[in-house]
Image: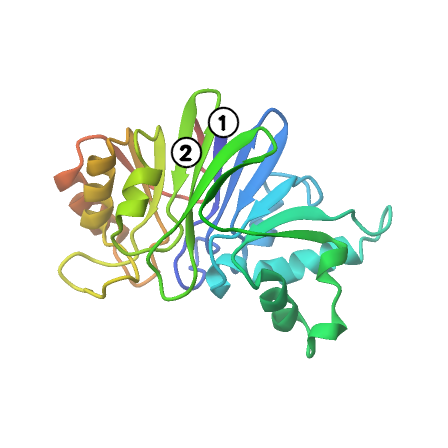
Amino acid sequence: MKLTVVGCSGSFPSAESACSSYLVEADGFRLLLDMGNGALGELQRHCGLYDLDAIFLSHLHVDHCIDMCAYFVARYYRFDGGRCAPIPVYGPEGTEHRLTTAYADTPSASSMSEVFDFHTVKPSTFEIGPFRVHTERVRHPVEAYGIRIEHGGKVLTYSGDTGVTAALDELARDADLFLCEAAFTYGKEDIPDLHLNGREAGETAARANARHLVLTHIPPWTDPQLNAAHAREVFTGRVDLAVPGTTYEI
């Protein structure tokens, strides 16, 4: 598997990064995890506009899904070759309605389902192209999911947005790469069931026996180096900070 960081900023785009979006590739199949603010432009640095094969939306906050509205325009009004065939989109219940109302004045004014084939995510195990995936509900104010992706004997886990939860420990169990949010700063914010800080991300990776931790979804007002330092205090494996354009071979 190959992972490319498309965007990694939390809450809103920074001067250096779009919001959450991560491209996972294997066997010629391209799966995009989230498409937050600014992600669609950055994505085109790494693959063609119409080269995605499936999209997974961890939850429906705008910093994880809002560029789907722009992607709808690109697919629906494609100027060369006509309208695109529907691409599978996996998201929480109500994804189509959420995106439609974000794009149009009234739900009837849009035809999202003509270019997106919506699938409702629940805690389950299923196939997306060559990937075997397992999803679990995580701790966030809205319905949100983490995802475990397996291919060729390797494991990539993406936390989405979450507070501390045993569900994430299991999703990340023995993961080769654990892409984990760390929006909060240890000793500063302490709001349960919302986000992790760097130390909590490190503790989760340690409990899960993950091999490599990549911290992401760090807002522009948070010091990423401090979060990484806090993670390294409790996790002895490799710790990186997500950087747009970085690729990892898993």
Q: Position of residue 23 (x, y in %)?
A: 53, 40
Q: Secondary structure at mark 2?
A: strand
Label 2: how many residues lie within 10 Å, few (<14), some (14-19) or many (20+)?
Answer: many
- Report the amino acid beneath label 1: Met
Nearer the observer, 54 or 216: 54
Q: How far is mark 2 from mark 1, CA to CA? A: 8 Å
Name the residue located 74 percent from the left edge and 74 percent from the top edge: 108
Residue 150 percent across, percent down from the top left:
46, 29
Colour basis = rainbow
Disc marking residue 156 = 2
Q: Pointers 2 and 1 in contact (CB under 8 A)?
A: yes
Measured from the top left, where is residue 127 in percent x and y?
56, 34
The structure residue drawn at horizontal position 24% and vertical position 31%, both measured from the top left corner, is 209
Dot 1: what SS? loop
Query: Which quadrant of the structure image shows residue 162?
Result: bottom left
Residue for point 74% across, 53% down = 115
List the residue tagged with mark 1.
1
